Amino acid sequence: MTGRGIPSRPHRRICMAATSRIREMDDSESLEEAHARIAHLEAELAEARRSVRMYQALGRCLAEFSVSFAESQASMAAMAQSIQDERSSAHLAAAAAGETRDAAGHMSERLKALADSSHAAVGDVDHLHGESKRITEMTELIGRIASQTHLLSMNAAVEAARAGEQGRGFAVVAKEVQSLSAQTDRATKEIGPLITGIQAASTKVKEHMDAFSADSLQFSESGAQMAEKMSSALDLTHRMEGTISGAALRTFVELAKLDHLIFKFEIYKVFFGLSEKSADDLAHHTGCRLGKWYYQGEGKQLYAGLAGYREIEGPHLEVHASGKEALHSFAHGDLGAAIRALGAMEKASLKVVRGLEKMAVNGGG
């Protein structure tokens, strides 16, 4: 043990008893009895020394225990950081899934509008196809009229020839009618193939538009289904994000509890003579991991509304203040005040732990 530790009381008590016994021995007491008393006191002293060595060994074990605590603390800190990173990734994934869902929904709406437009275009093509049939019928009618006109003009020319000089004017008219009927016949013959080509083209366009409309409608339905699936995936991602967030809070709470134990253990090590730390060496309540989390970090940003958050501030401050007071009193030899400060520290510590646990429960951890 170091010189600042609690003195070995059995050792001191035996030495004082031996001195007192030797002083009290009177002249009538035999030398053998004195030797026997001294041997007995030496045996007690040896036992006290064994006890001291045992306590020293126990102290070394506690020091090693403190090291293992610190290693566990580091592991939990790494795990907490890993979970925090996973939560950030889940948040980004949720945002990306939301954007994809919106894009899929927008695409589905556009495809639906395209399908509607295609369907309307098919109607227009059908109407055009019907009109082209009517034109064909009218062209055929004109052709028949032209043929009949041609026959009539030929008959008129024959009759004009029979009439001689009197039918000359009528013959001119008959010739003009015959020429007009011939032109009409040529025109109808030229229009016929054009109408046929238009009908064939409109038929192909109609077939393509029908297929395009069907594909657009199918794509629209697929897009709607994809948007629905993406919405379900987004809901799942949000639930996963909440679970990871709760796990992150739970991990930090357990890490804060472990930090709390290590903080107190460092104080007790001073009382056992295993450490030379002073009150000034202890962290301020705003400078420890919990304090930074509470006043500057995610605690304030994300969890300030949880039950238990406000409940830990006062007790946490008391833990640090009482711990400092305990070391200050111990350094000045006021063991009674130091013990009272330790008691206050433990009571406040229990309140902090309960507040942290309430936060973890309310945060889904």
Image (cartoon, rainbow, N blue to C red):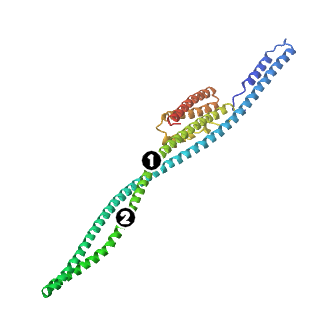
Q: Nearer the viewer, residue 206 or 66?
A: 206
Indicate left or right for 265 with 88 as reference: right
Q: CA distance from mark 2 to mark 1?
A: 37 Å
Residue 233 vertical placement versus 204 (above, below): above
Q: Quadrant of residue 319?
A: top right
Q: In screen coordinates, is 351 left or right of 145?
A: right
Dot 2 lies on which element? helix
Label 1: which residue?
A: 228
Name the residue at 65% across, 32% down.
268
Residue drawn where x is 32% and y is 70% of the image: 195
Where is residue 6 shown, x and y percent of the image? Answer: 69, 28
Report the amino acid beneath label 2: Thr
Residue 276 visible, this orientation: no
Q: Name the residue tied to disc 2.
A: 203
Q: Quadrant of residue 353?
A: top right
Q: Is residue 165 above or below residue 192?
A: below
Q: Nearer the viewer, residue 279 or 303?
A: 303
Q: Which mark is residue 173?
A: none
| Precedes in sequence: disc 2 or disc 1 | 2
The percent coordinates of residue 343 (x first, y second) are 59, 27
Seen in the picture, residue 217 relative to 322 is either above or below; the reply is below
Q: 36 or 302: which is nearer to us? A: 302
